[in-house]
Image (cartoon, rainbow, N blue to C red):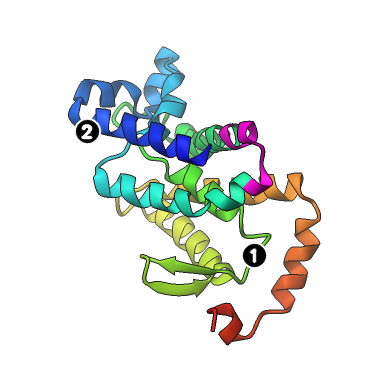
Amino acid sequence: MVFLIIIVTCVLSFTGFSNSSFFEKYQFNPYKISRHNEYIRWISGGFLHADQMHLFFNMLTLYFTADFLETMFKPSEIIVFYVVAIAVASIPDFIKNKNNPYYAAIGASGAVSAALFSLLLFNPWGIVYVFMIIPLPFILFSILYLYYSYYMSKKNYDNIGHLAHLTGAIFGIVVVAIKFPGSIPNFFVSLLNPPLLAQMFGY
């Protein structure tokens, strides 16, 4: 199912790259959702991307979560989880910009953050490669990521949906905590018993 999501996202994103009217019609636009009831935008915006690099990094991250998601969730649950994650991650931006006709957003980053952070409770000391180069323990990466997303969402320095990243990440953690309540005590046990550095980095 993860590969199906990746394929659909790539097809729709590449359609948007070459068809500006298609891109405009289906991007996330809180004002048009609120004023014109174009609710499809709430989901369809998560399947569009600004450019090929944006698409590549989102789909690559999603690909790395595939084994976990397909082990822990049924195929239908993966689809529901992903689509709901797109919607939930966009709620803060909808509330913030529903009266702003000039605001629009695209990208799967909120849902991808949910998929990535759904792993956190099971493996806080797993290694995440930032920019595919810098190795960090998942728990440290999570703290930095959440703080950075919160900080940048307040500053509005760029056009990146940092608030969607933050909301999506929290959504992923909450879903796993509800579906697998045993993951919570296991998380704290694992957190208090970190592996040796050699074990952590696979030596």
Q: Quadrant of the C terminus?
A: bottom right
- Principal SS element in the magenta part? helix
Return the residue at label 2.
Answer: 17
Reply yes or no: does residue 88 show up in magenta.
no
Q: Which residues are magenta?
A: 71-79
Label number found at residue 32: none
Assess disc 1: are there few (<14), some (14-19) or many (≥20) residues with their C-alpha within 10 Å of its C-alpha.
some
Q: Residue at x 59, y 37 (%)?
A: 78
Q: Residue at x 26, y 29 (%)?
A: 16
Residue 70 higher or lower than 21, as above or below: below
- Can you give x and y, in whole percent of width and height, for residue 148 in the image? 45, 62
- Under mark 2, the amino acid is Phe
- Under mark 1, the amino acid is Asn
**Quick one: 160 or 194, which is closer to the camera?**
194
Q: Residue at x 53, y 46 (%)?
A: 168
Q: Secondary structure at mark 1?
A: loop
Residue 168 higher or lower than 29, as above or below: below
Return the residue at label 1.
Answer: 123
- Using the rendered image of the protein, determine whether residue 178 is visible from the camera's viewpoint: yes
Please tell me how many numbered marks the rendered image carries: 2
Q: Residue at x 50, y 42 (%)?
A: 111
Q: Are the residues flagged by discs 1 and 2 in contact, CB closer than 8 Å?
A: no
Q: Secondary structure at mark 2?
A: helix
Residue 17 higher or lower than 173, as above or below: above
Separation of residues labelled 1 and 2 (CA atoms): 37 Å
- Can you give x and y, in whole percent of width and height, for residue 143 in the image? 55, 66
- Using the rendered image of the protein, determine whether residue 103 is visible from the camera's viewpoint: no
Is 86 placed left or right of 131 in the picture? right
